[in-house]
Image (tube, helix red, strand yellow):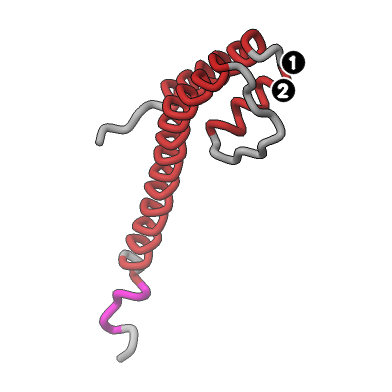
Amino acid sequence: MRPISAATLIASLSTVLAAGTAFFHFIEGWSWLDSYFFTVVTISTVGYGELVPQTPLGKIGTTVIIFVGLGIFAMAIQQFAEYHMLIRTRRRRNKLSLKNSDPAQNDDTNGV
């Protein structure tokens, strides 16, 4: 799978957050903060249950945000984890490479 750029992931997450926040603010009549909070809680699958959409359109919108937002959120987490595993693997290889190239450890006359 081809890696997705960090800019693309950030833009996608920002778009979903902004769209969800605006949607709930205008459709459910919630404050901007409550709308943002609900969007974050929904796409991160935390689901506190403090806020619940009351309108049919709000409920339908929530399901759309769940499917779209969760997909983007999961992709961001996967890319973040892959990036950090790559860094960890490179560091480990560099350590092994330095250890194997150390003349004191590879000198055959060292123990004689």
Q: What residue type is labelled 1?
A: Ser
Residue 93 drawn above or below residue 13: below
**In the figure, residue 59 lies in which quadrant?**
top right
Of the pair 77 and 106, the residue shown nearer to us: 77
Q: Do the residues labelled 1 and 2 touch (CB within 8 Å)?
A: yes
> With 105 as the anchor, is 1 left or right in this view?
left
Residue 106 drawn above or below residue 70: below
Q: How far apart are marks 1 and 2 (CA)?
A: 5 Å
Of the pair 29 and 43, the residue shown nearer to us: 29
Q: Which residues make up the magenta segment?
A: 104-109
Of the pair 60 and 74, the residue shown nearer to us: 60
Q: Name the residue under label 2.
A: 34
Give the residue drawn at x 57%, y 15%. 18
Element under disc 2 = helix
Residue 28 percent across, percent down from the top left: 66, 14
Q: Quadrant of the C terminus?
A: bottom left
Residue 15 percent across, percent down from the top left: 51, 16
Q: Which amino acid does label 2 sit on?
A: Asp
> With 91 as the anchor, is 41 left or right in this view?
right
Element under disc 1 = loop
Residue 31 image label? 1
